[in-house]
Image (cartoon, rainbow, N blue to C red):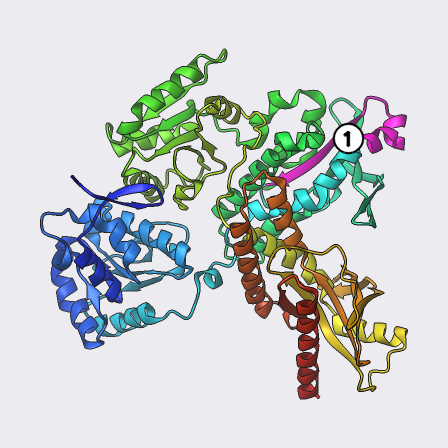
Amino acid sequence: MVSVYRKSNVVYPAMDRTWIDEIRDSEVLLIFDDSDDFYIKKWIIPELKAKNLKYVLPEIHIPPGRQKLSLMPEAIENSKKVLIILSEHTKKRFKCTFEIFLALEKSLSTNKMCVTIALLGSLDRRDVPKIPMLEHSMIAKVTENDQPYTIQKVIENIKDDSVSLSEKMPAGNLATGLAWSHFLGYLSIILPELSSNIIECEWFQRFQGKMSTRFFMLLPKSGTCRPLQDQDSRITHVGNLKIEVHIAGTKRVYTPNVYCIQDEERQEKYYCCAEVPNAFGCIGKIFHEKLGMLNSQQRNLEVERFYHVLDQILSHENNKRCHMLYELITYNDEDKTEEGLPSTHILKHFHKEFTEDRDEETKSHKKYKYDVCLLYGKDDENKAHVIRHTLMAKQDKPRIAEACPDQVSIAEVTEQVKDSKWVVLLLSKNQKWFEFWIVELLCSGVETGEFESQDICVLPLLYNVEPESIPSFIRWLTYIEAKQGEDFVERIYEIIKGQRVALRTQSPVGNVHEGLVWGFVVNYLRHVLPDITERIKEKLHQLGVKTSDRQNHYHTGLLELVPQNCEVPARMDIITDQYKIENMGRIEATKKQQQQKVVRVFACNFYKLTKKDGNCYYFAGEFATPIRTLHGMGASVICGLTADKMKKEVINFTDKLERIMKKEHDGQNCAIIRVNGENQNLVDEVIKEIHENEIWQKSQQ
């Protein structure tokens, strides 16, 4: 009987424990083609020995009678670092590509770049597989003339553990957190109220039949958030609605924009409420300002993901109050024709049914040979045939291609994938080696440039495996779990035909905190921190606080309190026998000249903490808003965010925020304080931070 090893629900043959121990005790695992054995032993091994760097060679340590390729997943999983040597041999045979992907997967899980690439012979950086993330690893060219120096640098890189992957790739996975933030912080509040407000507004009353009762959300391919009237001369901003709601006893006022759309062809004017979501605009800012090292393909993926995640949240059966109240529109604003104008796509929604037109709006105008390609392993052939049979029973009979890399060549599979609008990727426990042919497929397509000019829409279909088992190098937009009793084939049909798909309860794939923290920094902290010290001093002056009094203490920055238990109180005002915290009003918003334009500086709350001994502590502070989003996600019962996962996300959010603020221009004006949710702990941490700030102030004098 053959024992097995399980990792991410993929089954691999078990390895000899002695070799596992050797790998765990070593500092680096070497992976190379057997044809390069001479150069490895002549150039690299002697240098590793000279530097006392403990290494493992598969050819020496591999258990007798076992295939090296089948043992690589567990070998890489148990290694500290991986040195992959590429040459003409690996380039021709596509060897080592699988190992590169596995090493990058390990890097994601450990937050450390585990892979180093050494190039032999005539290879240079242009010959390295064009894989996202790989650009952040060290890629060294080794030649006979400079090999001692180059290998020395490689060894230094292998030994260096000081830099985390999140510092090299600060953008991470954005869309999920941004979409949830926009829903919980805005859409869930205004959408249920918006329709009645539109019906009562002056434009709806004056222009009967010319104003939509739905809320239009425009998602341009660039990821930027510019006023619609600045993008399109056919769009005019005519005013705002006013929606008043009470949240936790506080009145909030929201003012959605109203636009007039000029239809030049029909000589008509139409009206609607519309926006490019601020949260969505974070994607474009990160891309254009190179904050998170997003390339254009990653940006496009995040735009598509934002669309799918937000659409599925709003369509969920638990959010019936939002159903049929919105339109999500993606368009290519980088297109210089009329198709690149938002008015073109808004007008389509006035003239046609949404489901008839969505297919063309959300994707490019390329004509595909197939609507969908079913990609599966031999063991899942029956599942694929059932899906095909069910889809073909539909009245409009979608065009379907089937591709099983176990049975046909990679070239044939690549051709079918390239000719398909959607690729449904069957992932199950039956398919033990699906990574092998996925990697070969993606690499062959990338290497030949066949996938560079198009966005492949991959839809993973999970059979009894967790969402986390989806390899991160697959550019998936959304996924489906094939659960017994659910008509998952109908969901596949809805997606490939461009229909609205209701989200099922599922755990989010990827790190939610990435989008939350970047949205918080780009869309809020950057607008509240400028001149915060001067504004605090002005507020103290207005309150008549004598800063020379030794019992009066104050902080010169903004305190962001992050409850690590994810419980965010509605108010910070606290009164006990030992102390009290009072809200002393707002540090008002101002305007500031910045880079030849006037920008608005946001307001924030100002507090006074009074202790029983008479000492008073003044500070601008708040509970970090994104933590409310995390709590709301858990409470929604939509995304399946467990309590443990939620707490982990809070820790990751706090760590990430601290790293980013160290690099931000006004980052020194923000103090991030971890609190455990207890009032006494909050008071102690605030006082401690204010005292430390006072010491810093004196050191600057």
Of the pair 454 and 41, the residue shown nearer to us: 41
| In the depicted structure, whether residue 384 falls above or below residue 591 | above
Which residue is depicted at the point 61% across and 38% down? 310
Q: Quadrant of the C terminus?
A: bottom right
Q: Image check: 65 left or right of 302?
A: left
Whether residue 332 is visible here, answered yes or no, is no
Where is residue 293? Give x, y as percent.
50, 57
Whether residue 231 is visible here, answered yes or no, is yes
Part of the protein shown in magenta: 195-220
* Residue most extreme to the left: 64
Rendering quarter of residue 26: bottom left
Where is residue 699? Give x, y as percent.
66, 87
Whether the magenta-drawn stretch holds residue 199 is answered as yes
Where disc 1 sits, the SS reads strand
| In the depicted structure, whether residue 697 falls above or below residue 31 | below
Rendering quarter of residue 277: top right
Q: Image check: 160 left or right of 51?
A: right
| Number of numbered discs on residues | 1
Whether the magenta-drawn stretch holds residue 277 is answered as no
Which residue is depicted at the point 43% across and 68% down? 163
Of the pair 566 and 140, the residue shown nearer to us: 566
Which residue is depicted at the point 38% across and 61% down? 113
Q: Which residue is mark 1?
A: 262
* Residue most extreme to the front: 577
Where is residue 264? Give x, y as percent.
75, 27
Question: Dot 1, crowdedness within 10 Å: few (<14), some or many (≥20)?
Answer: some
**Type of amino acid under label 1:** Gln
| In the depicted structure, whether residue 445 falls above or below residue 60 | above
Q: Quadrant of the N terminus?
A: top left
Of the pair 251 and 521, the residue shown nearer to us: 251
Of the pair 536 and 546, the residue shown nearer to us: 546
